[in-house]
Image (cartoon, rainbow, N blue to C red):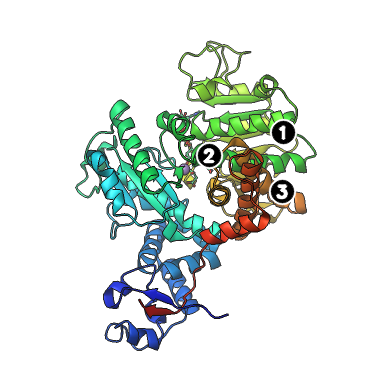
């Protein structure tokens, strides 16, 4: 296959300093001469494969998550082609280093390890200039991930240090869904931080101010959304790691103004629904047969419950019948409809058969009465699922499904090894962070990862390729059902979700299903299969070196 040479305007150090153009020692002699690189590069020549092997070894030689995550960030800033070729060829190995859990360490230490700019920090005092700042940003941005850093994984308010999350999540859009990295932008809205030790640290890179709230906060978000929609009219906005108080209200405010989704609410819901749909199908049951206990009535918990409710309606239950299948717990125990301080999302699932002053509303006592068949943890409270809770659950159901989904690793509500021990290996377990296999009956059992990373890359690609004006529940459901259909459980395997090595193939299928769902709802004009394929291709990119000629 011959490739048309790419006209490149940069030369010399400027070329080597551009991570999208840099080839390092893989520049061939002709390009070294044409671009003034002969005096800058040693004579040695390397192939992309050699560069990937050396880069991988360098990353693995580092000790610990922070050093490995930092090494990968450095590689990305130096040479995006090697970075993505490494991710794509060793995804199962690299994903935990570029993403959860190592990205959590990267965020905790983002200020100390800051080297080069990547993405945009939009700080509240500059609000009036957001449009001017964006004028300097590249043309052709199609997807923005934004955070305000207030709920970074289970780590809490990390202020501007939260930028590690949009950077890490964007890397998977390319590594899993093949989206061109030059079409995406990570953004942090720096609205201050209530993390006082961080704010007072001399190394902190962010705005040293308490978090803005109320009208001041809303004005910053509005200035940001106006600026991106004006600059890139068809941009898809991915909201990430906002605190519960802002996550749902912002999504509701903006979801019809521009295509957007909140990954913690919606992506999480889709992957949790996928794992559960596969699990119940493998058991020969229906979702509507289940009793679902959800610990953590925040963004993820309410998002999961809302999508499962829809799936039960699809199975024929009325909305009120479906709502009765759920038991939603938060800090105050089982949520009841007579509680005054429930969020709108919690109200849908609050129990009407229990009162707030009733005894035994704590998770363990209530579950001992409820006999849940599915138990989900999205509390950010490591170790919340006690031995008594899980043993009792397992005494009433043959194959309990247990999902400790909080991240990173130490926040998991229970470890897979403990859950397997407490259930004599009968549980179907899936975690938010990656865990090593667990020995059951002397055999290693792989633990699936119910992480929104299995959905959002394909969801984003499908939403973009379809050109849908919004991201709908039907699009999320299509993503969930597509991943569920790929579950090894339904193809003779034991794992609830496919391995990381299948993520690229899954993202493709999810994208097509999401686009078809958007068309079916009339959210975008109808597209033939070929037209959709062409749009996906136009968004796609492969980490490979093509020939350059001076522009
Ligand atoms: N696996 C995934 O893909 C995935 C996706 C999203 C979020 N998460 C994880 O889930 C956790 C929660 O995320 P979120 O966005 O829903 O946060 P959130 O703050 O919106 O919600 C957490 C909720 O848990 C409640 N909670 C805290 N301690 C509790 C306890 N002891 N018992 C019951 N409830 C308790 C809080 O009051 C809050 O309402 C985080 O650790 C996050 O990393 C995982
Ligand atoms: O980042 C992750 O690994 C999943 C999720 O979005 C989270 O906030 O925990
Ligand atoms: Mn998140």
The answer to which of marks 1 and 2 sits earlier in the sequence is 1
Identify which residue is drawn at 46% across, 34% down. 251
Say whether marks 3 and 2 touch (CB < 8 Å): no
Q: Is residue 131 visible?
A: yes
Q: Residue furthest front?
A: 525
Query: Which tag is nearer the camera, tag 3 or tag 2?
Result: 2
Identify which residue is drawn at 31% across, 49% down. 134
**Residue 481 against residue 354 in the figure, above or below:** below
The answer to which image quadrant residue 229 occupies is: top left
| Residue 485: mark | 3
- As measured in the structure, the alpha-carbon distance from the residue carrying label 1 to the one carrying label 3 is 15 Å
How far across and down, in percent of the image, does residue 6 sit? 43, 75
Element carrying mark 2: loop
Structural crowding at the residue carrying mark 2, measured as other residues with C-alpha within 10 Å and reported as few (<14), some (14–19) or many (≥20): many
Q: Is the C-beta of the residue carrying label 1 under 8 Å from the nearest atom of ligand 1?
A: no
Q: Tell me the quarter of the image containing the C terminus.
A: bottom left
- As measured in the structure, the alpha-carbon distance from the residue carrying label 3 to the one carrying label 2 is 25 Å
Identify which residue is drawn at 50% across, 61% down. 94
Question: Which residue occupies the foreground of this view, 259 or 280?
Answer: 259
Please name the residue that numbered disc 2 is placed on. Answer: 470
Please name the residue that numbered disc 1 is placed on. Answer: 287
How far across and down, in percent of the image, does residue 13 sit? 27, 75
Element carrying mark 3: helix
Q: Is the C-beta of the residue carrying label 2 under 8 Å from the nearest atom of ligand 3?
A: no
Identify which residue is drawn at 44% across, 60% down. 181
């Amino acid at each position: 296959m011959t490739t048309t040479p790419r006209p490149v305007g940069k030369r010399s150090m400027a070329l080597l300093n551009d991570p999208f153009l840099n080839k390092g020692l893989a520049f061939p002699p002709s390009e070294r001469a044409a671009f003034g690189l002969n005096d800058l590069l040693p004579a040695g020549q390397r192939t992309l494969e050699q560069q990937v092997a050396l880069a991988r070894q360098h990353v693995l030689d580092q000790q610990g998550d922070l050093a490995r995550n930092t090494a990968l960030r450095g590689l990305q800033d130096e040479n995006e082609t090697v970075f993505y070729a490494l991710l794509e060829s060793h995804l199962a190995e690299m994903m935990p280093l570029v993403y959860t859990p190592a990205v959590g360490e990267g965020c905790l230490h983002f200020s100390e390890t800051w080297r080069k700019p990547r993405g945009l920090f939009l700080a509240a005092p500059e609000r009036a200039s957001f449009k001017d700042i964006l004028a300097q940003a590249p043309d052709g941005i199609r997807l923005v991930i934004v955070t305000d850093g207030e709920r970074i994984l289970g780590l809490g308010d990390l202020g501007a240090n939260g930028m590690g999350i949009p950077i890490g999540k964007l890397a998977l859009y390319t590594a899993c869904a093949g989206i061109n990295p030059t079409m995406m932008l990570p953004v942090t809205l720096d609205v201050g931080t209530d993390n006082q030790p961080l704010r007072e640290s001399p190394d902190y890179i962010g705005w040293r101010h308490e978090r803005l709230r109320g009208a001041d906060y809303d004005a910053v978000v509005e200035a940001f959304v106006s600026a991106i929609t004006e600059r890139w009219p068809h941009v898809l906005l991915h909201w990430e790691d906002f605190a519960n108080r802002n996550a749902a209200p912002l999504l509701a405010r903006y979801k019809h103004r521009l295509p957007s989704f909140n990954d913690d609410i919606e992506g999480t819901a889709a992957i949790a629904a996928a794992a559960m749909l596969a699990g119940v199908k493998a058991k020969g049951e229906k979702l509507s047969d289940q009793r679902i206990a959800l610990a953590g009535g925040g963004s993820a918990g309410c998002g999961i419950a809302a999508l499962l409710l829809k799936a039960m309606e699809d199975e024929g239950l009325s909305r009120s019948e479906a709502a009765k299948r759920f038991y939603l717990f938060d800090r105050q125990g089982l949520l009841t409809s007579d509680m005054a301080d429930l969020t709108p999302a919690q109200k849908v699932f609050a129990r009407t058969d229990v009162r707030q002053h009733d005894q035994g509303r704590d998770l363990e006592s209530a579950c001992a009465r409820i006999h849940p068949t599915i138990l989900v943890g999205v509390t950010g409270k490591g170790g919340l699922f006690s031995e008594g809770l899980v043993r009792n659950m397992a005494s009433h159901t043959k194959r309990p499904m247990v999902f400790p989904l909080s991240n990173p690793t130490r926040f998991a509500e229970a470890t897979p090894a403990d859950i397997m021990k407490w259930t004599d290996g009968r549980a179907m377990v899936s975690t938010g962070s990656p865990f090593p296999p667990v020995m059951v009956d002397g055999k290693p059992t792989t633990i699936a990862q119910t992480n929104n990373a299995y959905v959002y890359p394909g969801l984003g690609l499908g939403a973009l390729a379809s050109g849908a004006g919004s991201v709908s529940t039907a699009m999320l459901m299509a993503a969930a059902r597509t991943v569920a259909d790929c579950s090894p459980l339904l193809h003779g395997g034991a794992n609830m979700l496919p391995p990381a090595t299948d993520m690229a193939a899954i993202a493709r299928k999810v994208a097509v299903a999401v686009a078809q769902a958007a068309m079916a709802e009339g959210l975008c004009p109808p597209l033939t299969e070929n037209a959709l394929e062409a749009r996906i291709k136009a968004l796609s990119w492969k980490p490979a070196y093509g020939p350059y000629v001076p522009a």
